[in-house]
């Protein structure tokens, strides 16, 4: 049998391992439902402070105190945060602070079994085959690393975390910028050519390909239609990824 062409497979989540619909119709509504109560109950949790600073920085401010300097009290500051989160989610803006907060809100949902992550049937089988063949698998998603671990730790196929050698999110850099993929290749200790990146978003694949990564375009039910003219091989299942 020929040696695999790659040493690492890097995976997107939404539209690739899992459906857009599960994220938009189950996970995002959960956040919107729990948001006000979560902020009220967890406001003094020290883990929330850096996330609030990140949300303020994503909005172009130095920190949370500066961003909410005009607020009269805690209730107004919470309302400011909630309004910003709803605004970002309305536009599906994948801001780092928003994604960190979403992950914190999902924690209870996954741990109590109210949320069970959807993964396509071919995903667990492929993860098993790839890792058995000696490939290392990493995730690169806009979802925070905390959210990724909850998601794959509580999937409908069970706990899949054992298959992953590591996780990347937007704290490494934006998914549509080539530099982010350079950083990931260096972090996993591989030449770009030895990494295969699979995603549903052509601009992400373009960025990875720019630095020499191999790519596959993930076509799944409910994904946004993709315009012709891109240069990426399309797959409808991970079973179509030939590792030699
Ligand atoms: C487990 S994270 C939930 C999905 C999410 O919030 C997201 O933004 C996924 O984006 P991706 O980069 O995986 O397409
Ligand atoms: Mg995606």
Image (cartoon, rainbow, N blue to C red):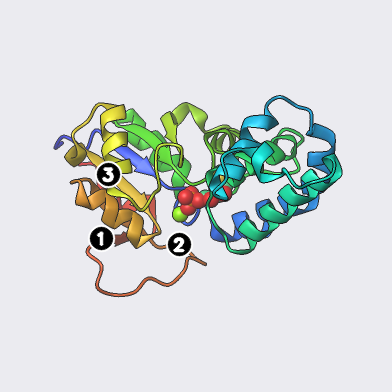
Between the residue at mark 2 and the residue at mark 3, the CA separation in whole angstroms equals 18 Å
Residue shown at 67% from the left, 27% from the top: 47
Q: Position of residue 213 (x, y in %)?
A: 22, 45
Residue topped by disc 2 = 220
Q: Give me the residue at 82% from left, 47% from top.
A: 76
Along the polypeptide, which appears first: circle 2 or circle 3? 3
Q: Residue at x 25, y 67 (%)?
A: 230
The tag on residue 233 is: 1
Q: Is residue 185 above or below residue 199?
A: above
Distance from disc 1 to disc 3, alpha carbons, whole Å, reads: 11 Å
Ligand 2 located in image quadrant: bottom left
Instruction: Quarter of the image for the C terminus: give it.
Output: top left
Instruction: Examine the rendered structure and indicate whether residue 50 appears above or below residue 173.
Output: above
Find numbered disc 1 in the image and state the secondary structure of the residue it sits on: strand
Depth check, front residue: 232 or 155: 232
Q: Residue furthest bottom?
A: 228
Where does residue 133 sit, x and y in percent of width and height?
28, 31
Instruction: Answer with mark 1 or mark 3, whichever residue precedes in sequence.
Output: 3
Query: In the image, residue 81 lies at what x, y percent?
Result: 72, 48
First in sequence: mark 1 or mark 2? Answer: 2
Residue under pointer 3: 196
Camera-nearest residue between 29 and 74: 74
145 displayed left or right of 72: left
Quick check: 193 above or below 222?
above
Q: For marks 1 and 2, give the CA distance.
A: 14 Å
- Badge 2 element: loop
């Amino acid at each position: 049998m020929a040696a695999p062409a790659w040493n690492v497979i890097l995976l997107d989540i939404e539209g690739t391992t899992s459906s857009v619909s599960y994220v938009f119709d189950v996970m995002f509504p959960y956040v919107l439902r729990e948001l006000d109560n979560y902020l009220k109950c967890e406001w003094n949790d020290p883990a929330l402070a850096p996330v609030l600073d990140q949300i303020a920085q994503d909005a172009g401010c130095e920190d949370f105190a500066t961003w909410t300097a005009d607020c009269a009290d805690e209730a107004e500051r919470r309302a400011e945060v909630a309004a910003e989160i709803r605004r970002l989610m309305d536009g599906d803006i994948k801001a780092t602070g928003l994604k960190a907060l979403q992950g914190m809100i999902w924690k209870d949902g996954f741990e109590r079994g109210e949320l069970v992550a959807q993964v396509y049937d071919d995903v667990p089988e492929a993860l098993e085959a790839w890792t058995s063949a000696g490939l290392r698998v990493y995730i690169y998603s806009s979802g925070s690393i905390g959210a990724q671990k909850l998601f794959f730790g509580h999937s409908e196929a069970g706990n899949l975390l054992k298959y992953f050698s590591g996780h990347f999110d937007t704290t490494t850099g934006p998914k549509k910028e080539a530099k982010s993929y350079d950083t990931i290749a260096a972090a996993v200790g591989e030449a770009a050519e030895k990494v295969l990146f699979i995603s549903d978003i052509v601009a992400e694949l373009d960025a990875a390909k720019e630095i020499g990564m191999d790519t596959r375009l993930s076509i799944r039910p409910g994904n946004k239609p993709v315009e012709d003219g891109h240069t990426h091989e399309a797959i409808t299942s991970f079973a179509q990824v030939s590792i030699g």
